[in-house]
């Protein structure tokens, strides 16, 4: 325990502990989501693509985008995007084309095979959402409350990066 945490009042210590729990949950949930997708792909016999690449295909959907656009939307980080896009093009899940205006930039979109992978992920998410609701694990109100809190956290972190606080 640091000196700072020894000096905190009880309320602040409670907020800090809850905040640290939330950070851990966000990390674990992301890793678990990737494991769930990986397990689904093993179940359907799709082994050449990883879960990060599958989420990339799912999030691109029917759009035509650049790696920079994906990063600016907050989906992916740095070279990870470029590497995965390159692999997806090589494996035939995406088409790529140089932008007419900026020849340094490459636009990508899903191929038919990429749309098939996207559909597998989409079907998985539909089944999960349905199960959450039907088994009364999380209904729409609870999910909306979680999303509202996560959006406030996202805004707080974005403001931190922009030095507002």
Image (cartoon, rainbow, N blue to C red):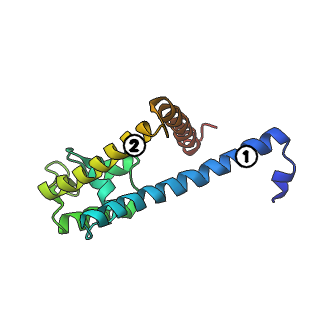
What residue is rendered at 12% in x and 54% in y?
A: 112
Question: Considering only order in the chain, which callout, 2 or 1, is on the residue closer to the N terminus?
Answer: 1
Residue 103 lies left or right of residue 72; in this view the side is: left
- Name the quarter where the N terminus is drawn: bottom right
Residue 161, position as x, y percentages in the image: 55, 45
Question: What secondary structure is marked by label 2?
Answer: helix
Pick whichever, 59 or 34, lies toward us.
34
Q: Residues within 10 Å of mark 2 (few under 14, many from 20)?
A: some
The residue where tag 2 is placed is 131
- Name the quarter where the C terminus is drawn: top right
Q: Is residue 45 above or below residue 5?
A: below
Residue 96, position as x, y percentages in the image: 16, 58
Question: What secondary structure is marked by label 1?
Answer: helix
The residue where tag 1 is placed is 16
- Mark nearest the camera among 1 and 2 is 2
Pick whichever, 83 or 48, lies toward us.
48
What residue is rendered at 37% in x and 51% in y?
A: 71
Pick whichever, 43 or 28, lies toward us.
43
Q: Is residue 94 above or below residue 132?
A: below
């Amino acid at each position: 325990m640091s000196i700072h945490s020894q000096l905190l009042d009880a309320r602040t210590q409670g907020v800090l502990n809850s905040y640290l729990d939330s950070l851990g949950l966000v990390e674990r949930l992301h890793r678990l989501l990737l494991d769930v997708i990986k397990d689904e792909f093993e179940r359907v016999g799709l082994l050449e693509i990883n879960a990060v690449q599958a989420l990339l295909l799912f999030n691109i959907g029917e759009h035509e985008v650049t790696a920079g656009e994906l990063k600016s939307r907050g989906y992916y980080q740095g070279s990870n995007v470029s590497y995965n896009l390159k692999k997806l093009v090589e494996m035939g899940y995406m088409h790529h084309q140089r932008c007419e205006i900026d020849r340094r930039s490459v636009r990508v979109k899903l191929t038919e095979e990429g749309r098939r992978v996207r559909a597998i992920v989409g079907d998985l998410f539909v089944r999960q959402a349905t199960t959450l609701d039907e088994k009364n694990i999380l209904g729409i109100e609870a999910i909306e409350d979680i999303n509202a809190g996560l959006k406030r956290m996202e805004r707080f972190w974005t403001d931190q990066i922009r030095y507002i606080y």
